[in-house]
């Protein structure tokens, strides 16, 4: 298996993954709503995804800050002894990117072609990371697929992570809208982020 690399560090080999399974116990048949017994082929669940293999870590020590960053900012700000950078496949990444918000307030007006063009535009501008804002809606699969193909990492806020209302976060947990939202409900100042790996 070859490793997937962000734009500017290497190629982006992707692999097809086909998964199928038959759940234990009873399941609803696709037609008529009747139940079938375990092992019945009509209960089979199938999924196909395109995936890449890589490791991503957020390093806060062990890597010195890049020379291009040292000396910037006001005098005496920070120790200069620590860093905050992404390490992909063991290689520090100088992230270049932008923030992504939903392309329109009405989800029905989003187009697959428009989302793919957005990612391609970022890649053509030599961006290798996009932050996906957590206050909107989850984007369609085409956005994520294009990012994988173009070598763009995604830093995805957990849904509603920017909400100042802890009740909203607890409601979203019950509704099953976001992973890791329990920490947000318990500690309102925390903001959860996931790097798509």
Image (tube, helix red, strand yellow):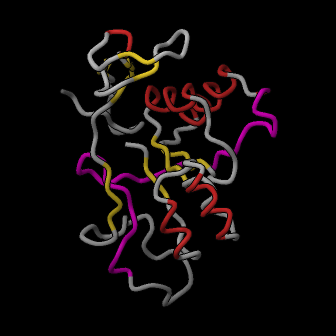
Image spot of residue 175 (x, y percent): 60, 50
Up/down of 86 relative to 59, above or below: above
Observer-nearest of 181 and 60: 181
Residue at the (62%, 62%) spot, across then down: 169
Residue at the (56%, 69%) spot, across then down: 185
Check if residue 185 falls in the magenta segment: no
Horizontally, residue 75 falls left or right of residue 134, namely left
Image spot of residue 59 (x, y percent): 32, 64
Residue at the (56%, 84%) spot, across then down: 74
Query: If the image is split into quadrants, where does the C terminus sit?
Result: top left
Image spot of residue 157 (x, y percent): 55, 54
Observer-nearest of 115 and 185: 185
Check if residue 107 falls in the magenta segment: yes
Residue at the (37%, 64%) spot, across then down: 66
Up/down of 31 relative to 81, above or below: above
Residue most extreme to the bottom: 76
Residue most extreme to the left: 1
Up/down of 110 relative to 170, above or below: above
Name which quarter of the figure residue 37 lies in.
top left
Q: What stretch is highlighted in magenta?
A: 80-108
Name which quarter of the figure residue 86 lies in.
bottom left
Horizontally, residue 176 falls left or right of residue 94, namely right
Query: If the image is split into quadrants, where does the N terminus sit?
Result: top left
Image spot of residue 153 (x, y percent): 45, 42
Q: Number of numbered discs present?
A: 0
């Amino acid at each position: 298996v070859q490793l997937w690399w962000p734009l500017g560090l290497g190629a982006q080999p992707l692999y097809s993954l086909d998964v199928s399974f038959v759940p234990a116990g009873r399941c609803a048949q696709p037609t008529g709503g009747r139940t079938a017994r375990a092992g019945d082929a009509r209960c089979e669940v199938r999924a196909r995804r395109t995936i890449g293999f890589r490791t991503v870590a957020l390093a806060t020590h062990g890597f010195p800050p890049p020379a291009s960053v040292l000396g910037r900012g006001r005098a005496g700000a920070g120790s200069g002894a620590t860093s905050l950078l992404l390490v992909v496949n063991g290689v520090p990444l100088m992230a270049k990117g932008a923030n992504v918000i939903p392309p329109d307030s009405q989800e029905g007006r989003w187009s697959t072609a428009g989302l793919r063009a957005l990612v391609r535009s970022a890649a053509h501008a030599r961006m290798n990371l996009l932050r996906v804002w957590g206050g909107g809606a989850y984007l369609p699969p085409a956005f994520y697929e294009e990012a994988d193909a173009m070598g763009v990492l995604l830093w995805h806020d957990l849904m509603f992570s920017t909400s100042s209302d802890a009740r909203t976060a607890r409601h979203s947990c019950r509704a099953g809208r976001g992973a890791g939202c329990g920490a947000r409900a318990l500690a309102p100042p925390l903001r959860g982020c996931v790097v798509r790996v």
